[in-house]
Image: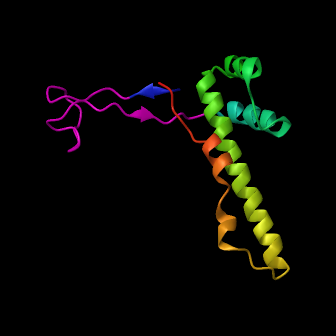
Amino acid sequence: GLELSHCVGPSSLGPTGPWRSGGPCKMKRVRTVFKPEQLERLEQEFLKQQYMVGTERVDLAATLHLTETQVKVWFQNRRIKWRKQSMEQKAAKLSQFGVIQPASADSTGGKDHEEDAVDVEL
């Protein structure tokens, strides 16, 4: 799940890193690890529709025992991966026919990329 690691202070028994010595406590978000069943269901839903919004997202999150934010961010990241794969497939087809792609083809486009910028809500 979405968890925060605990602050490690000088009095605790845990290891301390140089980034924590003498400074304020820094909270670090722990990366969400999805269960295989959750990933399978998320992928199934993504194949049906690339955008999950409103009550559909709430219902899916509840069914998978995830937060709505986790589902939202998963879909954002999956769309980015999907676009990247699409671009790579187009590039492979073009190169197969000897067509050279312009350098700007690596960009996914400013508007779409900004839309899917991942913002973690705590």
Q: Is residue 66 left or right of residue 53?
A: left
| Residue 16 within the segment the image draws in magenta | yes
Identify the residue shown where x is 25% and y is 30%. 25
Magenta stretch: give its range.
5-34
Identify the residue shown where x is 85% and y is 35%. 48
Of helix, strand and loop, which mostly describes the magenta segment? loop
Identify the residue shown where x is 75% and y is 17%. 55
| Residue 92 within the segment the image draws in magenta | no
Where is residue 105? Give x, y as percent. Answer: 70, 66
Quarter of image, res 44: top right
Quarter of image, res 59: top right
Where is residue 81? Give x, y as percent. Answer: 68, 50
Q: Is residue 121 above or below residue 63?
A: below
Quarter of image, res 92: bottom right
Q: How is the image coloured?
A: rainbow
Where is residue 64? Give x, y as percent. Answer: 68, 22
Identify the residue shown where x is 66% and y is 47%. 111
Is 91 or 102 nearer to us in this picture?
102
Query: Which residue sits furthest front?
Result: 111
Is 25 or 33 nearer to us in this picture?
25
Is 45 or 40 nearer to us in this picture?
45
